[in-house]
Amino acid sequence: MSTATSSILRRALLYVPSSSPKFLQKSQSLHVDSVAYDLEDSVTINQKPAARQNILSFLSDGPRPAHIGEVGVRINSVSSGLALEDLNVVLGAKNLDALIVPKVNKASDLHFITDILQHILPGRHPSSTSTTANAESNPIKIIALIESAESLTNLNAICKASPYLSGLIFAAEDFALDLSLTRTPGLSEFLYARSAIATAARAHNLPSTIDLVCTKFRGEEGLRTLEEECLGGRGLGFNGKQCIHPSQVEVAQKAFAPGDKEVEWAVRVVIGDAKADAGGRGAWTLDGTMIDVPVVGKAKATVKRAEQCGIDVDAIKEKWKHQEPA
Ligand code: COA
Ligand code: MG
């Protein structure tokens, strides 16, 4: 039950506080897979009405931000009582691709958002009994923030709650608050939650799992910490990172794209396997390591992801076109 589209790239999702016209303007010049213009925690309660109007005019009057892959808005949570007011304004914006919904604690939170999408924008969200969204109507996608113990225990139901659900985000700060945890550099206190989220998203075929914010963003040390966190997240099955500052975007997007050696290995496996297959061999060796069906599957996924990330895979294929299975 999802708008699973493996072509969606959300290696970095940058929050831009919508109360700040300066930050909104700045976002026009940024190159980033996904942006969440924020109405939630970076905007004080008094500033929310003005922030909603800022988004509406920024995403309707001006040109669509040229180098942002996906334009999203983070609304306030359903339980805050502010979500309906947010949606009444921001769903009027012309250039809106996604809603980032915080504090999704149970399936009914997403039922609420889904009903509103179908009522306010029926053209993009035709009601149907089908559990799958019709991609041709260009529905607004939902990305749900998982940030409480309740949310984690309801993950399965949340993942099935809306045909527009397209990804999950782990929000460490609110999760730590809920469980009275203290964040440590190794992040071991979040291991269960992060693994559960990555696994649930995979089980429900949701294309994105976006990992916790790295709150350090200044200087070399900040970016080194960010890179380590990204690689740790990738190791758990995440494919993107929440960012709070433009300086973080490039590091995150590089960390969540396959590296040079990885792509080269994957191309060699795919080329070698086609020849092994033609010769009637299901298992063969590359550099002394056995290659068989699951390894080839991983290599094919890496090649696809590399192409999606704009890596020149054809040049690597050309270099290795004579790869033979051993
Ligand atoms: N989105 C867009 N532009 C941003 C930005 C953001 N999140 N953060 C910084 N910038 C811009 C600044 O406007 C500045 O632009 P300029 O060089 O053209 O003047 C440039 O990037 C450098 O900014 P800098 O001075 O280093 O940062 P700052 O001190 O102005 O702001 C923060 C630091 C943390 C307050 C700011 O990055 C921020 O508010 N981030 C988002 C926080 C948020 O949304 N939290 C909730 C989600 S977890
Ligand atoms: Mg939060």
Image (cartoon, helix red, strand yellow):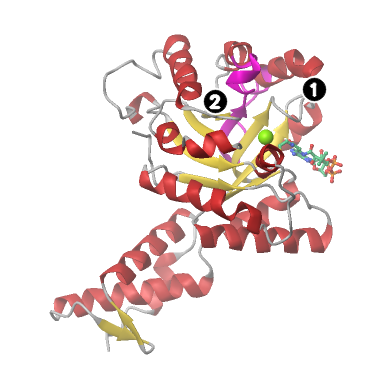
Which quadrant would the N terminus be assigned to in this image? top left
Relative depth, front residue between 180 and 88: 180
Q: Considering only vertical position in the picture, is 133 above or below 211?
A: above
Q: Residue at x 81, y 63 (%)?
A: 220
Q: Considering only vertical position in the picture, is 236 above or below 157?
A: below
**Residue 253 appears in which quarter of the rendering?**
bottom right
Q: Earlier in the sequence, mark 1 or mark 2?
A: 1
- In the rendered image, residue 183, in percent from the top left (x then y), is placed at 73, 52
Judging by the rendered image, the residue that carries numbered circle 2 is 96
The answer to whether residue 163 is visible is: yes
Which quadrant would the C terminus be assigned to in this image? bottom left
Q: Considering only vertical position in the picture, is 101 above or below 265?
A: above
Query: Mark 1 CB in 8 Å range of ligand 1?
Result: no
Disc 1 from disc 2: Cα separation = 23 Å
- In the rendered image, residue 43, in percent from the top left (x then y), is placed at 77, 25
Task: State the SS at label 2.
Answer: loop
Q: Is residue 61 magenta?
A: yes
- Comparing marks 1 and 2, which lies closer to the viewer? 1
- The region drawn magenta spans 57-83
Q: Is residue 186 left or right of residue 166?
A: right
* Marks 1 & 2, CB-CB < 8 Å contact: no
The answer to whether residue 70 is visible is: no
Task: State the SS at label 1.
Answer: loop
- Report the amino acid beneath label 2: Leu
Q: Is residue 308 magenta?
A: no
Relative depth, front residue between 83 and 139: 83
Q: Residue at x 38, y 40 (%)?
A: 4
Which quadrant of the figure shows ligand 2?
top right
